[in-house]
Amino acid sequence: MNGPQRMFAGFCALVVLLSCPLAYAAQTNARDEAQTIVTGMSLRDKITQLLFMDFRRWMTLSGEETIARFVEDPQYGGEPVTEINGEIAAMLQEYRFGGVILFSENLKNTADAVRLVRGIQRAAALKGGLPLFIGADQEGGNITRLGQGTCLPGNMAIGAAGSTEYAYEAGAVTGRELHAVGLNVNFSPVADVNDNPENPIINLRSFGSDPDKVSQMAVSMARGIESAGVVPVGKHFPGHGNTSSDSHTSLPRVEKDLDVLREIELKPFQALIDAGIQMLMCAHIQFPALDSTTFRSISDGQEAVVPATFSRAILRDLLRGEMGFDGVIITDAMNMDAIAKNITPADAVVRALAAGADMICMPVELRSPSDAARIEEIILAVVDALQQGYLSQAELDQSVERVVRLKIKTGLMDVKVDAESDDAAVRSALEVVGGAAHRAKEREIAEAAITLVRDEHSVLPFRPKGGEVVLVVTPYANETASALFAMNRLKAEGTVPEDVSLETYVYRGKSLMEEDLSAALERADYVILQTEMSGTASLLPGHWLTDLPKAVWQNVQAAGKEDRFVHASIGAPFDIVNYTDCPAELLSFGCVGMSDADAASGIITGKYGPNLPALLGAVFGAFRPTGTLPVNIR
């Protein structure tokens, strides 16, 4: 080390030494302030501060209209909430919730979303309540909530791009847009290691199957989100990547011992904790090697192993004790069938709090003022559990202190949301959300993710001449709009001649070659076959998602057009095992389409996936694909 380097290193060390007391003092002040606030709270307010509610829909129609809707749809749950109303405001003032989660229905339009979020915050604070955490699942890829926001290509695509810088930038873009709308929590990054091709719910939401790379990507994305003043939430602890069922519909189970979990599932979460993440979400998944305690399911009366959500061994002993996490633990949504089918809402809240959860996400649905009775049931159940000694008052107070302390540390307690500044907030958000710079980054990352599996005969890129026909064969109709958008963009940029024709064919539900497809294949000079899997069952013979693509490939071979054909796996990449004989193969790691209107106009106004336009860019030589496969294919 030379002289200047030693001086710089010494300076850095001095900065660290000087800043540590300041950081410690700030942390101590936040802790003391939180304790003071919690000491002055009623028990009722402490309990509701631990609830993270949704106002996804509300019964706003007249009685007759509501009855008519129920006749049409027995599952009718009200109209999407896009603006605050008096009933919701009253409930926010009566029950001083700790947070609110919003969904696509609430965030379709940026301007309306800003006014909704600010209205929710004002209502919560009107009678002295604490500011709310307001969050959304803005992961990117298939899971995006901002209707007019930038749509990053998803975590597996970022894993394929292989750059922690891209992970950071994706998080920063997402954080800036959420912050502009007024949201302060993002339920991201997904830190699950997807090492099970049969996983029906995580797959593309994971960065990949290598725990070290997932750790690096998750930490980088979390830091990017945090750089915009938004709280990142790592999920789904202890790990949802090895499940073969979906906790939205069942109670998954992972059969791994602790040593294996430490080497795979737990690594990204430990990395996030070491990097200082302040909130983690626990999963509704059974880990019998970690906790074999059982509870009795109300669905069939049988004993079932507790999910992590109800496990003190997992949340307190492992996560807090061994792994050293002192931030806020929030449950996954409690209305998911893994929980809702097996236990009553009030009992579920009590069990989760006893296990060590600090915040309960969506413990009950609120759809009208009458649903206040459900909140009262929860409050009574918690109070009774405290009186019976099942819950500890000291531990409950600690949970509330963690929630309040995080609100203090993030500056949320100092935020003022006055109605006079709503218009200015809307204008500011419209400049940020879906802005040109963010769209450019969206495209850059999506293109960096495109992965060339093979090109044995050097058929790529396609170089169609004027008058020739390109055929895109794809499973779903919304994907055809993405092909049109991509082709128009490639023509505008001079990559493809203006008079090249695009044809599309949607094969949803079709297992056999029909005359119109045969005719389209005969007309085509170039063929792009897009496939995706809906689960490993769709890879078996007899399923349309496998049979029709195979028939297309056989037709191409019979016509001698192999040198003008490419197979593209546009969803989870595990379906490439069915196409090992295709000489040219690409992966996009995302299949979200777009609206016909956006495709025709070339102006993005709503949600879409950048993966498919990037895929076509690679096919026609707008760039050279450099992505690498981030998961094991077996």
Image: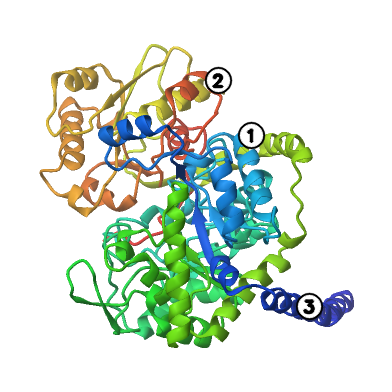
Q: Residue 78 location in percent, x, y?
A: 41, 40
Q: Which residue is mark 1?
A: 111
Q: Amino acid at mark 1?
A: Ala
Identity of the residue drawn at 55% across and 55% down: 100
**To which quarter of the image does residue 9 belong?**
bottom right
Q: Mark 2 packing: few (<14 Cα in 10 Å), some, or many (20+)?
A: few
In this picture the colour scheme is: rainbow
Give the residue pinned by disc 3: 29
Q: Measured from the top left, where is residue 347 in percent x and y?
A: 37, 72
Residue 554: x percent and y percent? 16, 34
Q: Kindly identify the amino acid type of the residue bearing the numbered disc 2.
A: Ala
Residue at x-position 48% and y-position 17% = 497
Sooner in the amino-acid sequence: mark 3 or mark 2: 3
Q: Secondary structure at mark 3?
A: helix
Instruction: Identify which residue is drawn at 46% across, 75% down.
Output: 382
Distance CA(mark 2)–CA(mark 1): 31 Å
